[in-house]
Amino acid sequence: MDGGGSGEERGPSGPRRARPGRRARPGTGVWGLLALLLLVGLTLLHQGGTAGSGGPPQPANALADLRSPPAVRAAEPLPRSVPRRVRVPAVRVDAPLTPVATDGDGWIEAPPARERNLAGWFAEAVTPGERGTSVLVGHVDNASGPAVFYPLGAVRPGMAVEVSRADGRTAVFGVYRVEVVAKDPFPAERVYDGTGHAELRVLTCGGGYDEKTGYAGNVVVYARLTSVR
């Protein structure tokens, strides 16, 4: 399963481009559009690398966390600047970032599945550190095995996500929630809703796995800007 979007899927005669089964509806606004696109993008593709061997780590959902305000102190938002790299030191994620957007058919593009250590940032929304909700996506595995966000389900509240930016600053986000959400219906309002602060969401595939349909859900890491280096 990939955690990013449309890409290559292993077919009987080799790779083919996966096609999503749902279109974004006009007039939904940037986050409504993004939610629909990511819902498609994060459920398209299993590359066959890891699920049969136990699969990636999964978070333990805690409903109390969903009702409680995040116990992190917000830092002042930053101006716009292109993100270059994402690090989650506690789970050894350290990867370059590439912009992903929507293609001519309205589908969100994913980092190339062959690039195991590459994540994407959704360039049609705010950049990490700006006021609003920025989004990073990445593959959980590919045909060769674990990929960039394979360990994302092991992230826990209190850990840090660091995003290096083109302006030389590093935006440090404090994680306050990690959960697995269903693919359908996707809880877009809860995942992407603005808070008035600089927020970050990091997504990949997760949940139960089926050989025919792939992963059942998405792992979502919620984090808030807490400091700048």
Image (cartoon, grey):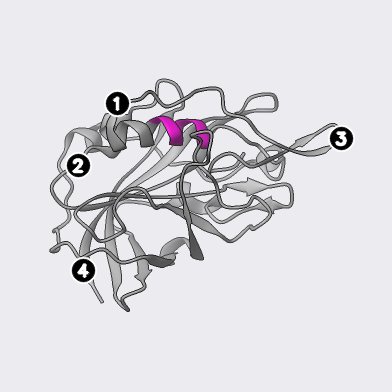
In the rendered structure, which segment of residues is drawn in magenta? 36-41
**Badge number at residue 27:** 1
Between the C-alphas of marks 4 and 1, the distance is: 35 Å
Q: Which x, y percent locates residue 171?
A: 28, 67
**On screen, residue 73 above or below 8:** below
Give the residue type at disc 1.
Answer: Gly
First of labels 2, 1 by sequence position: 1
First of labels 2, 3 by sequence position: 3
Name the residue beneath numbered marker 3.
13
Disc 2 packing (10 Å; few <14; some 14–19; many ≥20):
some
Q: Quadrant of residue 1?
A: top right
Name the residue beneath numbered marker 2.
194
First of labels 4, 2 by sequence position: 2
First of labels 4, 3 by sequence position: 3
Name the residue beneath numbered marker 4.
227
Q: Are marks 2 and 3 in contact (CB under 8 Å)?
A: no
Disc 4 packing (10 Å; few <14; some 14–19; many ≥20):
some
First of labels 4, 1 by sequence position: 1
Q: Which x, y percent locates residue 110?
A: 55, 47
Between the C-alphas of marks 2 and 3, the distance is: 44 Å
Q: Are marks 4 and 2 in contact (CB under 8 Å)?
A: no
- Check the image and name the residue furthest to the front: 104
Q: Secondary structure at mark 2?
A: loop
Left or right of 20 in this view: 224: left
**On screen, residue 48 above or below 209:** below
Between the C-alphas of marks 3 and 1, the distance is: 39 Å
Left or right of 100 in this view: 46: right
